[in-house]
Image (tube, helix red, strand yellow):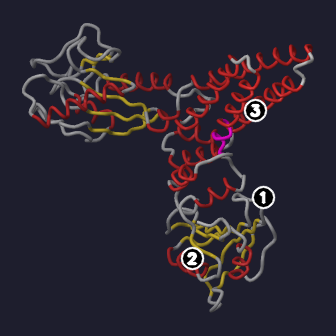
């Protein structure tokens, strides 16, 4: 991958479609547009042009074209867009014509966005937000991703970074004028107060709910002994046959995960092997061990077994209330009584799950940190607390430098190439 090359790709959905948009980015974008359209249109104005093959002059399509001279473009480079009729043959013909031009090649996955990052059109946090937006499936995920992609976190981190620089300057002044008592006392007080305030703000951000639950879903595990109704309840919650239902004990031998959106919130519902101490053969025992691990990692456990036998904090569920004349588990104080077969009580359970999930997710207006961001912000907070405890000015200055370095890494001002490959490689071609 070379930054100086001119790239092109289909940036809209797969044909056939009403329209297909091909983007061209790089130093040869203008020449490529001229080669197909005959003349370079006015900058940033949509123009109707007949596109022709550069060699044969055969007509390819009648298209709306746009020309964006760099660097104030989406990628920070010269950029052209061809808005074609969205048939497969049209797209293939135009791509083939572009591929025959010298200096042009098909873009790799995420390469347009990677160039935007490398050219300073977006920082790493904004790029991560764009990645989340591309994969968003629920309204909550969409809103959070747009906040990240539009720079809410980046602006907050930038303000923290400026404050660290200000504090560092005060420490430098204190070092330079340490022989003047009035300057030293004033600087020491100002730095101490500033570090405490900044560390408090970052600690508050670290304490907020993380992005993983919003991105991956609230993990809800259904647990209990064999034939307690776990698989039937899972199917009722996801409204499809995700798990096999049978009266034979041990039917579910492994964990079964079913992602679902409830109330606009992503969940991952997990059916587990029935928990029992006797009668389980070797493979079922493996499933039981995995079930216990799943319960430990769950955000919410729905316990369908004997009352009080579930893990601490589990929701007591009295299931199968439609079954009469049959031995079933009854409970004195269940959180929910329901029948997955008739649907009685299921809606109330869904409402409870949604309301509880809202307390586990970032609230409206909050920016959620992913694992990488949380780790680096944690490093910044640790360095600030260390700076606050330091009486040696040189050590305090070094701690502030480490705090700033962590913020720089969060925004991608210092980066690791492998991490960038992993992030942008998950994007689609043309993005």
Nearest to N terminus: mark 2 or mark 3 = 2
Q: Mark 3 points at which residue?
A: 159
Q: Main secondary structure of the magenta part?
A: helix
Instruction: Measuring from the top left, give residue 178's x and y in whole percent.
Output: 87, 20
Residue occupying the far top of the picture: 332
Q: Mark 2 points at which residue?
A: 95
Instruction: Measuring from the top left, give residue 333's x and y in whole percent.
Output: 29, 8
Instruction: Measuring from the top left, give residue 301's x and y in whole percent.
Output: 33, 23
Q: Is mark 1 on a helix, strand or loop?
A: loop
Tell me what residue is drawn at x 17 percent, y 16 percent.
329
Q: What element carries label 2?
A: helix
Nearest to N terminus: mark 3 or mark 1 = 1
What's the distance in space between the residues labelled 2 and 3, CA to CA? 44 Å
Tell me what residue is drawn at x 57 percent, y 53 percent.
417
Q: What stretch is highlighted in magenta?
A: 407-412
Above or below, 138 against 91 in this view is above
Q: In which quarter of the image is residue 370?
A: top right
Q: In which quarter of the image is residue 159?
A: top right
Do the numbered discs 3 and 1 sit on residues whose CB atoms are within 8 Å? Answer: no
**Viewport quadrant of the C terminus:** bottom right
Instruction: Measuring from the top left, give residue 27's x and y in whole percent.
Output: 72, 71
């Amino acid at each position: 991958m070379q930054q100086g090359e001119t790239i092109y790709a289909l940036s809209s959905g797969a044909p056939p479609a009403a329209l297909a948009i091909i983007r061209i980015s790089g130093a040869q974008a203008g020449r490529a547009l001229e080669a197909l359209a005959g003349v370079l249109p006015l900058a940033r104005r949509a123009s109707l042009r007949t596109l022709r093959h550069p060699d044969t002059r055969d007509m390819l399509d009648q298209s709306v074209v746009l020309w964006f001279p760099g660097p104030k473009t989406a990628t920070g480079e010269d950029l052209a867009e061809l808005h074609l009729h969205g048939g497969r043959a049209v797209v293939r013909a135009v791509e083939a014509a572009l591929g025959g031009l010298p200096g042009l090649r098909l873009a790799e996955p995420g390469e347009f966005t990677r160039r935007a990052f490398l050219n300073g059109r977006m920082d790493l946090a904004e790029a991560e937000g764009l990645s989340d937006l591309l994969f968003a499936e629920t309204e909550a995920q969409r809103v959070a991703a747009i906040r990240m992609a539009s720079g809410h976190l980046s602006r907050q981190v930038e303000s923290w970074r400026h404050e660290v620089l200000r504090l560092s300057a005060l420490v430098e002044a204190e070092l330079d004028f340490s022989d003047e008592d009035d300057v030293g006392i004033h600087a020491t007080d100002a730095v101490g107060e500033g570090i405490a305030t900044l560390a408090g703000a970052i600690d508050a951000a670290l304490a907020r709910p993380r992005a993983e639950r919003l991105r991956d879903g609230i993990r809800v595990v259904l647990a209990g002994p064999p034939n307690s109704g776990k698989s039937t309840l899972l199917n009722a919650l996801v409204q499809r046959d995700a798990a096999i239902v049978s009266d034979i004990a041990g039917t579910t031998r492994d964990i079964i995960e079913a992602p679902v959106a409830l109330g606009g919130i992503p969940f991952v519902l997990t059916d587990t092997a029935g928990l029992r101490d006797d009668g389980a053969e070797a493979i079922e025992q493996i499933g039981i061990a995995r079930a216990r691990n799943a319960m430990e990692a769950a955000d919410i456990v729905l316990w369908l077994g004997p009352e009080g036998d579930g893990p601490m904090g589990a929701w007591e569920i009295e299931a199968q209330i439609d079954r009469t004349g049959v031995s079933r588990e009854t409970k004195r104080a269940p959180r929910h009584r329901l029948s997955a077969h008739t649907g009685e009580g299921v809606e109330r359970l869904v409402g409870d799950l949604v309301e509880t999930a809202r307390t586990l997710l970032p609230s409206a207006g909050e920016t959620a940190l992913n694992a990488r961001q949380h780790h680096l912000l944690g490093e910044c907070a640790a360095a600030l607390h260390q700076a606050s405890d330091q009486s040696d000015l040189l050590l305090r200055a070094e701690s502030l430098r480490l705090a700033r370095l962590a913020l720089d890494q969060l925004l991608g001002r210092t980066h690791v190439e492998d991490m960038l490959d992993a992030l942008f490689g998950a994007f689609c071609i043309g993005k």
